[in-house]
Amino acid sequence: MKLEDRNNMTHDLVQDGKLNAVLVGSADDSDTEPVRQLRQSVWRATGEQMAIVEPGSESLRRLSEQVVRISLEIADLDPERYQIATEGKRLVFRGGSEDALLRGVVYFLDRFVGVRWLWPGELGTYVPKAETIGFPDLQVDERPDLELRLLRVRQSAPLEGRTWLRIHGMGSRTSYAFGHAFTKWWSKYGQEHPDYFASPPEGQQQVREDRIKLDISNEDIDDVIIREWREAGMPVNWNVSPNDGSGFCVSPGCLAMDEPPDQSVMSIWRAEGQLTARYVKFWNRLLNKMRMIRPDVTLSTYAYSSYKSPPPPGLRVDGFIVQVVGFYTDYDQWEGWSGAGAKLFLRPNWWHTGAIAPNLPLHAQGEFFKFARQRNMLGFDFDTLFGYWATQGPNYYLIARMSTRPDLSVEDVLDEYASAFGQAAPVIRTYLAYWERFAEEAGFNIQIYPNGNYARLAQQYDLPRSTLNGAWYMLPYLMTDAVMAEAEAILDRAVKAAGAEDGEAQQRIAFLREGLRHMAATREVVRYGYEKSRPEGATKEQYVQMRQQLDAKRKEWSAKHVIWYESLAEAENMRGIPTHESRTTGWKETDSKGLGGKEMDERLLGL
């Protein structure tokens, strides 16, 4: 992406290599992120360090009138609003909070210095060298147009990662509440009122308590929901999204609410039915009762799982705020919910797919995000950014960038990413295209790509098909030496194209290569850790040694943001991935020979 037209610049921050600006403030300001980003970016662009001078000081009075005086001020503004103004030779940044002030500084550095924050840390921040940095007269008064901007990270995410999110404008001013709303209902009401809860099919046991569904044909639950809403002060918005997972009700009352009728009760129970109609009828019934008490109340929910499809004709969702949990192919889903009257947020699980592999469906994700933005998207909530920066970082950068710069195309953003690799930029575009083609052929998400390599290999080797954990077990079969060698060869070409004198570009190429090395090492630990893929004659001692070596390297890679060690460890533990002794079995003769793919998928569903 090119910088703003230099012909329109009327002020010089740097002219012919000479810094022409000071920061007006106190020395304490240097510890704030807006000041840090501004000073560090100018220094990296020019080699000149911007001085901080006290307001009213003799040093400030002695400055030439031509020197630009930059002020960063917290002002009485909306906490998300920032302003940038030229006032003579003053350049003033104002924000309603430090985060808003940071957004103003990023606005300036993006457009007039060309800074690109590709991944956390200094290496991931690209600052082009410049002899001259100019800017025009400015009168900017903005706040993010999306009211929710959330790329979720784990609690363990490092500070530099959280700073990266702030730089890219993540935040929220929404008053709408989301999440699975009934996770505590069984512990509160299950013993006394089992009739509130889903009826299983004959011979089936109830799912775990935080995932139990309600019998929404029982209107007694309306009274409980309304009572809880009243006790919370009758807020203008109330969350009624069903719990996650399987275990949907198959009582006669619930089945009578379904469109189409006469669906298989086992399909419904397993979360494979079509249940949008029953839930829309329930939500409308509940909303009508609540609006007798507070006429402006709205309900929020997910469009997800068995209630993902838009409502059938004739069923409206006016008064509903819906987070769409779909795929990047679900254009009709988005249009259908919008056409039925809902206000929409995007709430993808896209980044749970592919394990640690470079699963990069960049154009598919970026084009859908742009489509949703252009069709009244109020905000987004991505679950989850796990920190696999050297393999999946381009996904993260693409969405973060397009959220703050909707004027950019997917191609623009990918060109930005590649530009940080200097003369190797065209080769890096080839590298991204290689993995993008691979992602489509692999088809990590079987629901989108039922005929992809993933689906074929899962059937051939009896591996899990779930998007949540299956890709880990697929690594030995899908990420072959031949696949990896072709990617390494592209990076070899990038090394030559960048040239030995461009140290930063070489380090960034090495960063991508370390992502491949991590993936290859993890692949082998999984191969040995899972009984069904374990080489004949392998010993647990070999496995433990490999696992320990991987763990030590992961800590080194984590310090560079190749991965985030803690987030990765939590993800693998959550999914039961055999990358630790506590999660590997089959080493004793008395052990089982390993669960098959179908059994593992059933276990993940909680069935």
Image (cartoon, rainbow, N blue to C red):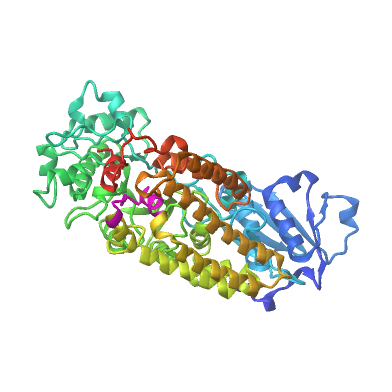
Question: Which is more toward the observer, 374 or 487?
Answer: 487
Q: Is residue 34 magenta?
A: no
* Extreme residue toward the front, this view: 537
* Extreme residue toward the top, this view: 192
Q: Position of residue 564 (x, y in %)?
A: 55, 47
Which quadrant of the figure has residue 576?
top left
Question: Which is more toward the observer, 399 or 108?
Answer: 399
Q: Quick check: 525 above or below 250? A: below
Q: Is residue 583 left or right of residue 54?
A: left
Q: Position of residue 48 (x, y in %)?
A: 81, 62
Which quadrant of the figure has residue 478?
bottom left
Region rendered in magenta: 460-475
Image quadrant in which the C terminus is located: top left
Residue appearing at x 22%, y 41% in the figure:
288
Q: How many marks?
A: 0
> Would residue 512 be seen by someone viewing this image from the given angle?
yes
Which quadrant of the figure has residue 213?
top left
Q: Quick check: 490 above or below 29? A: below
Q: Is residue 215 left or right of residue 511?
A: left
Residue appearing at x 65%, y 63% in the figure:
115
> Would residue 400 be seen by someone viewing this image from the given angle?
no
Question: Which is more toward the observer, 338 or 426?
Answer: 426
Image quadrant in which the N terminus is located: bottom right
Question: Which is more toward the observer, 88 or 63?
Answer: 63
Q: Position of residue 522 (x, y in %)?
A: 49, 50
Q: Is residue 273 left or right of residue 573?
A: left
Residue appearing at x 42%, y 55% in the figure:
475
Q: Position of residue 583 (x, y in %)?
A: 42, 37
